Image: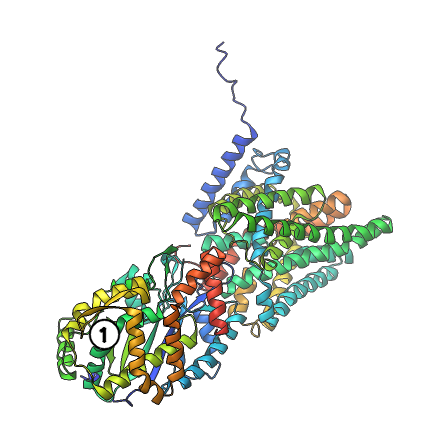
Amino acid sequence: MDEASFTASAALSVGIELELQLVRPHDFDLSRDAGDLLARLAKRKLPGAVKPEITQSMIELNSSVHEGCTGLLEELEAVRGAVAQDAGVLNIRVSGGGSHPFHDWADRRIFPNERFRFVLERYGYLAKQFTVFGQHVHLGCPSGDDAVFLTHMLTRYVPHFIALSAASPYYQGEETSFQSSRLTAVSAFPLAGHIPFVSDWGAFLEYFSHMKQFGIVQSMKDFYWDIRPKPEYGTVEIRVFDTPLTVRRAALLAAYAQSLAAYHFAERPQQPSRTVYLVNSYNRFEACRYGFKGDMVEPYESRKKKIGEDILDTLQRVAPYAARLGAGELLAELAAGVRTGESDANWLRAQHAAHGSLADVVREASARWEKGK
Amino acid sequence: MLGFLPQLPPVLSHAALFGALVVLGLLVGEAARRYAALPRILGYVVAGALLGPHALGLLSDNMLFDLRLLVDLSVGLIVFELGFRLDFKWLKANRWLLVTAIAESLFCFWAIFGALLFFGFRPLLAAMAAAIGTATSPAVVMLVVHELRAQGQITERLLLFTAVNTVFAYVLLTLLLPFLHLQHQAGWEQALLHPLYLLWGSMLAGYLACVLMLRLAAWLGKSEERQFILLVGMVVVVVGTAHALKLSVSLTLITFGMLARNLDRGYAVLPVHFGHGSQLFFVILFVLVGASLEFSAFSVAAAAPVAIFIIVRFFGKSLALLAFGSPSGIRPGGAGLLAVALVPLSGSAVVMVRDTTTLYPEFGRELAAVVLSAVVLLELLGPIATQFALRRAGEAHPDG
């Protein structure tokens, strides 16, 4: 089974994918200009890649593979500048954020390629409702067994990833009261959720081949899990992040994930545990709904903690590894934000309070993404 | 006799006739769309033409005159929305865009002007006809865009270029007025002050309206309902005022729209969505436009210049777009489609001709011979061209 053979990659190498919103300035609804913008960007020599996504209202930035997140950040800043400039020429605004606050899903147009047509055919309105914007972080693993181990270990931190990136308080024109409403759109897919509790790569392959025999999946791509091994890249892919409002924050989140991986690979402080999956959906909900202020059940100590508090504790624990990866300052910045309760979702709400309409929120968010601050 | 019974046949009020007109326009429009895959707008125009003074005569010239305010109001709303879509920031970020837009107007003007001179028209007549021919119809373009729910690069440029060539045509036409006055032995005061009054007056009126509306919108707050009413109310007032002051309604309203968009530093005005309301105005407008089309303007003698007018006009626009389209970021193949989309000739050409006619009837009639038959033709061909181009560009909504 070629597809499932694990391509080894350098441990802890890091890369990200960033789904971005394309917005039209006259009313700040989503635009349909992905094709034109991509054609324009194709003429530039950019690091990484810029790709179409499922609807014509989004593009996806793929970074190249990095050893550390300061290099990643530099690259992202350069690409951001180029994208913002070309978008300006075409009168398109580009924005971060996990959801567009008020677009009407029925208006979305699927990008015309085979895979996306298949997804639309298969999932109907879910595919169009899936016009939400996430950041994926890839972490390199030397072997399939390492990937399975890391997937299990990182699942414990899913509420952290959600709270730190939450940037979708508005959805379909409504204040959702959630910090991240985006994940609800993902949960509707039948193959959403998490990896089964398998102990190593061999067991995982067995599970995969069963699912394939049943005809439930055709490829690894069909699993819409929060965290999944990606054998063709030799990585573990974390998919629960909302796209943050700046590329800088995208790099901070990647640095956090990378430091966590370094800590777990080096110290192996815990072993995979079923309890993690037992409490996962509760923790996930709390993080989506309340962000840092939510409760989470700490699966290894079996006690409740505030998510924000648990993030700060964890940041302290992984600080030596972050320093070794050159990401000490980035994580310090992340921690400072958690202490003051800053999040992109709160920032978006503040814009709404200050300006009074969701169109204003989109305008301010795109100005922020384009400037990078 | 039973006194409570009405006289036979009953005498219907203008309002009732007008309502019937709207319903009929709507039905014919829907039929055009369902059975012939034509833009609804054609149905509205045909319905109007059938009912109009030149065919069945249910709509008399007098009634058309009474309803002129509605036409102005509809045009006012449309032109305002068009102006509101024109974003100076885009022109700043993309310098080639402004070059393309101006070239589009200039090339088109010179092409028509040259061709008409070649056909032996007097320079002033040729210049005025060419100026009128430069403008793309804001109403047709907006209606087709609404109907197809089109969006994308070609659509945005179509709206932008339409706004620019509309302004260009008005300004140029106004600047030609002195020559017209002088040719007719008017005093130099008249020749000089009339264009100045028209241009500066219209722009000033647009500016004042904008300042007032921004204040009021800021006070009202961000409620779509309240702002919608404010907007419609303001447009009605401004249209009426422009009329009363004998200013150019279109120039005033497009200035109003443009400035409302670009001077709104505090973002007080919400994005304009006229919604179903705008559809109603479109039906009214095009039924009335259909009714006032002057089929009698057709004559065999004018056929050649009219054909040349239409062809040369298209080539002028195409040439500019092909020359400058690519650096301004139009995708390959897009320039041609854009030129096709820009074909509709402004129905307000009729108004411009009429205004000239009231000043100098003889000259007006000569102008009408060329321009009005082109209007008749392009009123029918234009919407089809725009619809075709936007569909072909892949920017129409599948259900649109």
The answer to whether B250 appears left or right of A327 in the picture is right
Neighbor class of circle 1 (other Cα within 10 Å; few <14, some 14-19, many 20+) is many
> Coloured how?
rainbow
> How far across and down, in percent of the image, does residue A345 sit?
38, 64
Location of residue A140 with respect to A334 vertically, above or below: below
Q: Nearer the viewer, residue B60 or B2?
A: B2
Chain under callout 1:
A
Q: Nearer the viewer, residue B340 or B68?
A: B68
Q: Nearer the viewer, residue A157 or B133?
A: A157
Q: Nearer the viewer, residue A223 or B149?
A: A223
Location of residue B396 with respect to B98 vertically, above or below: above
| Residue topped by disc 1 | A156
The answer to whether B140 appears left or right of A79 in the picture is right
Q: Callout 1: helix, strand or loop? A: loop
> How far across and down, in percent of the image, does residue A351 sit?
46, 61
Picture quarter containing residue A311?
bottom left
Location of residue A277 with respect to B39 vertically, above or below: below
Q: Quadrant of the N terminus of chain A?
A: bottom left
Location of residue B221 with respect to A118 vertically, above or below: above
> How far across and down, in percent of the image, does residue B70 sit?
59, 40
Q: Amino acid at mark 1?
A: Arg
* Residue in the image at 48% along x and 49% along y: B224
> How far across and down, in percent of the image, does residue A40 sit?
48, 76
Picture quarter containing residue A185?
bottom left
Q: Is residue A191 visible?
A: no
